[in-house]
Amino acid sequence: MELQKSIKEDKIVNPKGKDAAVILFIFTGILVVLGSLGFGRFSMALILPSMQKGLGFNYSQMGIIVTAAFLGYLSFSLGSGIAAARWGSSKIITFSLYLTGFSMVLTGLGSGFFWPLIWLALAGVGMAGANIPVMAMTVAWVPAERRGFASGLLVSGSGLGLLINGFLLPRLISAPGGQGWRTAWICLGIAVIIIGIWTNFKLKDQPANSSGFTQVANNPMKESIWKKIIKIFREKPVLRRLALIYFAFGFSYVIFTTFFGAYLTETRGWSTVNAGRLWSWIGVFSLPSGFIWGWVSDRIGRRWGLITVYLIHGSCLIAFATLPWEGAIATAALIYGLSIFSVPAIMNAACGDEVGAQLAPTAFGAVTVAFGLGQMAAPAVAGAMLDMGWGMVQNLWLSALIAFLGALVAVFLHQPISIPLKMDKSKT
């Protein structure tokens, strides 16, 4: 009953006449995703090869460090939703941005194997603590029929990060002395801290005078949050299937984004500058990926949106790994970029559809645990394969296979979870 009540109350959380406040929320949300994922997570593809050389790591050691970052993300994926439900999303997001930024700065100042591992693990905790609650906040700010589109707008912060990283990082990393990777971490960390300061003053948990949401938010939870989680997964089996699909995305995309620079420079013989330039163009192409595919999923359903996206991902990864021409490689990468951030947008919208405003951060955090498991396992598996003599190409083939398996699981999302639009048409 409580779950149904949460979903019903979700329909009145976004009163009219709040356009300016919603725009400010969307803008701030994009900045949060830019800081937590764009500068935090998606800087690794370009920084890690230089960092590996500077610290003298082999592929397995580098894979362990990346896995530690993703383990940090995983460890707070569910915790961030629980914390946001108890203390408010804006407080958790601001704290997490500070944690991410300072950890990135300390990564740039660190040496040896132990300290970079610790700092990147803490940065991963902060990335989850900022990204997951801000994505779930769209349930409170945006009507359900536009939620996929709005989630996609926030996800575009990751694409903006790719664009900035591609232009900025190669110039920082290629500085004389071989220590440019340290400068890169420090500069990006300071940028994340600045975003945290903005968020502290501008991000609000809910629209002003939102009586529907206030009633939900101020209604104390009579059950423990863990019982809530068990209940929503028992009552909503589609969330369990979404978790499996999200695991496939975490495993598949992380190989591409983590080893992108190493693959082009070491296997394909590209220069760091050219690899960075393509990374920037992927960022440009990825900017509309979230809201385009979020909008598509609003129209055709989350299930068919996911199937289509995973088929595109798998095909592009195979082409990226096997085609011999530079132009074809770039084309495959750019097409991949057009849908790279679609899955988080669709997943966030789907969770909001299923459980409503109050439980959305917890539900999205719960399925993100599966995503975190995927992205934590992938670097360790890929690094071990490389040290055993397997090439980057084989890693990309593995990534494509997992993407196709994600599409297969999506086929069995028997119950459609999109918001029906026929009722809206009948009113016009």
Image: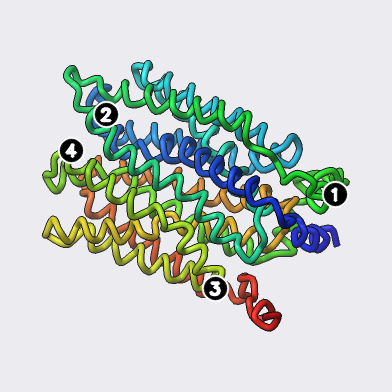
Residue 299 numbered tag: 3
**Pointer 1: what residue?**
215
Identified by mark 2, the residue type is Gln
Q: Nearer the viewer, mark 2 or mark 4?
A: 4
Between 122 and 284, the one lying in front of the other is 284
User: What is the C-alpha distance between the residues marked 4 and 1?
Assistant: 53 Å
Asked whether residue 409 is in view, the answer is no
User: What is the C-alpha distance between the residues marked 3 and 2?
Assistant: 45 Å
Q: Nearer the viewer, mark 3 or mark 2?
A: 3
Residue shown at 13% from the left, 55% from the top: 326
Identified by mark 4, the residue type is Val
Between 45 and 296, the one lying in front of the other is 296
- Mark 2 residue element: helix
Which of the marked residues, 1 or 3, is nearer the chain's N terminus? 1
Asked whether residue 87 is in view, the answer is yes
Is the residue 336 above or below the residue 51 in the image?
A: below
Which of the marked residues, 3 or 2, is nearer the chain's N terminus? 2
Q: Residue lying furthest bottom in this view?
A: 426
Identified by mark 3, the residue type is Arg
**Pointer 4: what residue?**
273
Disc 3 packing (10 Å; few <14; some 14–19; many ≥20): some
**Pointer 2: what residue?**
52
The image position of residue 185, as x and y in percent, is 36, 25
Residue shown at 11% from the left, 59% from the top: 325
